[in-house]
Image (cartoon, rainbow, N blue to C red):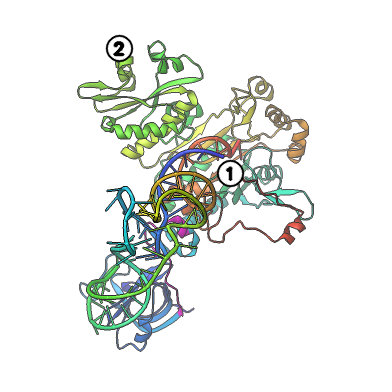
RNA sequence: GGAGUGGUAGCUCAGUUGGUUAGAGUGCCUGCCUGUCACGCAGGAUGUCGCGGGUUCAAAUCCCGUCCACUCCGCCA
């Protein structure tokens, strides 16, 4: 051991001891006659004093920020008025005896812990960025979270079993990352979008309870909360129904929040149906910290002399709805314009509103509505003086998405949150999404069990519910799962409904269909987006903030410069030829 | 594939209507300084104004193209 103590762990009890510390120079203050060094290690910072009579004083003068030092010295109480309450170790300091420079450092491209450094620079010098307090804290917390989860899983008899990264391309879902096979020219592995089928096979193998904290890969365009490689907490169990699984996952989540960040999520998460979530919040991942709901006013608008409202009110694929914001009458014209532009992202052609001022309602649309209708709107939305009512009138999807997102946007701007934490289960998902051409896609994935038997499913595919469930916390989908299909005939029925031919089903999922015929137990599970969960728990909006070495929005690594060209020889070995896209 | 924002000193940014030698803070270097803790004081060095082209007597500034980063739509079973 070249050190006896961590910097951040030295305090009053150590006064009088000779300690040896190692760490980085967080800051140096040279007063000519006396030099102060703030030395930083994994546990914190401690101040070292070097007096002119120290044999290493002239060496100390050459020290710069981020040098790595080994220092031995005497722990002393700071003099009266000299303590620093901002430092945990601020009551004491180390009077240096020996100073050894273990390594020097060039001036860093940015100051560690400086705020506002552009992400481009941070990612290029990620190893320096990770020295910052904020990143250290987040990655520490991440480790405590995964450790807690492993403990919980282990306690409940879940086995940690690894599944392959080099696997088979899937026909549906996200775009696959592909890996060329050298030994099989022209063929490719795919990196898994999730271990879904392998964990089901493990149930068929009789392991009964499986979990894995595992990377997943999806080659799709990125967002603030999406990375091309991300981590799932992947879970599967046999012989449990959805309520049992949800209860167990709920327990884990509650205990995790309590023990790691001391947040109380309550004893039981509320549940909402998919249909209600969409109707009331416009989105399938409702943020119920916000005490505002979208209110349908189709019936009211059927006969008004205002086509923009009456037409969608009379069309079954459309919707007219209102969003009342308490105290929103103070929103300026300029900000309403801003919101109008915001909802246009989701296809809304405008954003009608009524403000309730002291002198009564004011709005550009009042002239199209008679007083009776206006009063009914006010009544149905419960609006009071000082409120604003926004309206959406368009295709249902556009109204839901624009008012749903507007609801969250306005709530953020005006700080309309009721509580700090709001977990909720979303259940009763439709089994299928209906495409414009009438074909079906799985809402969850093709292995999700429907509530009904296979004959009923065939008759009612477009309205059938699945046995899927999503966990949403603060408007962020942190996990989802389902009871899976465990009978081969049902699986074949679902694949058929999805438009997958017998031949294609055999090619893509033959191994699963085969396995289902050898005593597959009823099973189900869940997958948590671990990065998103950690984002919520660390209070950041950027997934890159909870990943040590993340990719940019175009899926490059600014640190290593990946992806790069490779030598032609390698491509020849892989029998891969490059054909560049043509440029116009 | 599309929309928006940004790119000027190592870093964070300002830069007016196109007009002299492109600035500030911070960092860096040098000197001074024995109690600071974002130490202080004095001095100094540092620019591919993202890149390419165009307009102009003159471009960081206007126009066209392009690259990079970020946010969003599409996409993400």
Taking depth in this image into account, of A90 and A282 the one nearest to the observer is: A282
Magenta: predominant secondary structure element? Answer: loop
Q: What label does residue A220 carry, if any?
A: 1
Say which chain tag 2 marks: A
Residue located 24% across and 28% down the image: A386
Q: CA distance from mark 2 to mark 1?
A: 50 Å
| Residue located beneath label 2 in the image | A372
Q: Is residue A165 above or below residue A286?
A: below
Say which chain tag 1 marks: A
Taking depth in this image into account, of A92 and A329 the one nearest to the observer is: A329
Q: What label does residue A520 carry, if any?
A: none
Q: Is residue A374 above or below residue A49?
A: above
Q: Is residue A294 left or right of residue A467?
A: left
Expressed as whole percent of the image width and height from the top left, the position of residue A165 reads 67, 52
Q: Is residue B20 above or below residue A345?
A: below
Classify the position of the C terminus of chain A by image quarter: top right
Residue with the most extreme top position: A303
Q: Is residue A461 above or below residue A78?
A: above
Residue located 52% across and 31% down the image: A427
Residue located 27% across and 65% down the image: A85
Expressed as whole percent of the image width and height from the top left, the position of residue B69 reads 49, 52
- Give yes or no for contact between labels 2 and 1 (Cβ–Cβ under 8 Å): no
Q: Is residue A197 left or right of residue A364?
A: right
Is residue A221 rendered magenta in the image? no
What is the span of residues highlighted in magenta in the rendered image? A102-122
């Amino acid at each position: 051991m070249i050190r006896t103590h961590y910097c951040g762990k030295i305090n009053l009890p150590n006064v009088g001891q000779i300690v040896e510390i190692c760490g980085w120079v967080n800051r140096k203050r040279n007063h000519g006659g006396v030099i102060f060094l703030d030395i930083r290690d994994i546990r914190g910072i401690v101040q070292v004093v070097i007096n002119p009579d120290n044999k290493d004083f002239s060496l100390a003068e050459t020290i710069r920020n981020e040098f790595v030092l080994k220092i031995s010295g005497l722990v002393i109480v700071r003099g009266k008025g000299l303590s620093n309450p901002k430092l945990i170790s601020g009551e004491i300091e180390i009077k240096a005896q020996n100073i050894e420079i273990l390594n020097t450092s060039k001036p860093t491209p940015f100051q560690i812990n400086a705020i506002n450094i552009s992400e481009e620079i941070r990612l290029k010098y990620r190893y320096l960025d990770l020295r910052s307090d904020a990143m250290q804290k987040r990655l520490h917390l991440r480790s405590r979270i995964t450790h807690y989860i492993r403990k919980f899983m282990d306690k409940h008899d879940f086995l940690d079993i690894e599944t392959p990264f080099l696997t088979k391309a899937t026909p549906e879902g996200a775009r696959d990352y592909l890996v060329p096979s050298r030994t099989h020219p022209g063929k490719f592995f795919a990196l898994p979008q999730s271990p879904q089928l392998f964990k089901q096979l493990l149930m068929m193998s009789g392991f009964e309870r499986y979990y894995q904290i595992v990377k997943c890969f999806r080659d799709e365009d990125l967002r603030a909360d999406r990375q091309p490689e991300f981590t799932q907490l992947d879970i599967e169990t046999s012989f449990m129904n959805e309520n049992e699984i949800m209860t167990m996952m709920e327990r884990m989540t509650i205990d995790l929040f309590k023990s790691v960040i001391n947040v109380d999520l309550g004893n039981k998460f509320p549940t909402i149906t998919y249909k209600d979530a969409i109707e009331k919040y416009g989105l399938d991942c409702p943020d119920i910290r916000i005490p505002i709901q979208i209110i349908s006013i189709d019936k009211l608008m059927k006969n008004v002399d205002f086509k923009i409202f009456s037409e969608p009110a009379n069309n079954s694929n459309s919707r007219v709805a209102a969003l009342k914001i308490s105290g929103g009458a103070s929103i300026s014209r300029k900000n309403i314009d801003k919101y109008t532009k915001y909802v246009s992202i989701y296809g809304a052609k405008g954003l009608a509103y009524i403000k309730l001022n002291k002198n009564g309602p004011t709005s550009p649309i009042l002239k199209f509505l008679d007083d009776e209708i206006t009063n009914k709107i006010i009544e149905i939305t419960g609006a009071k003086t000082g409120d604003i009512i926004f309206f959406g009138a368009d295709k249902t999807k556009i109204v839901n998405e624009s008012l749903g997102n507007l609801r969250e946007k306005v709530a953020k701007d005006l700080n309309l949150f009721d509580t700090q934490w709001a977990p909720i289960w979303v259940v009763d998902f439709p089994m299928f999404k209906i495409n414009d051409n009438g074909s079906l896609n799985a809402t969850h994935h093709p292995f999700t069990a429907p509530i009904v038997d296979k004959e009923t499913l065939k008759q009612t595919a477009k309205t059938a519910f699945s046995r899927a469930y999503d966990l949403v916390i603060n408007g962020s989908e942190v996990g989802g799962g389902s009871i899976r299909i465990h009978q081969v005939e049902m699986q074949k029925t679902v694949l058929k409904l999805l438009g997958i031919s017998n031949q294609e089903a055999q090619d893509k999922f033959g191994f699963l269909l085969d396995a289902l015929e050898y005593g597959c137990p009823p099973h189900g599970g869940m997958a948590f987006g671990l990065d998103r969960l950690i984002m919520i728990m660390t209070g950041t909006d950027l997934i890159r903030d909870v990943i040590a070495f993340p990719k940019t929005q175009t899926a490059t690594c600014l640190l290593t410069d990946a992806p790069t060209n490779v030598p032609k020889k390698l491509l020849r070995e892989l029998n891969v030829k490059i054909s560049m896209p043509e440029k116009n």
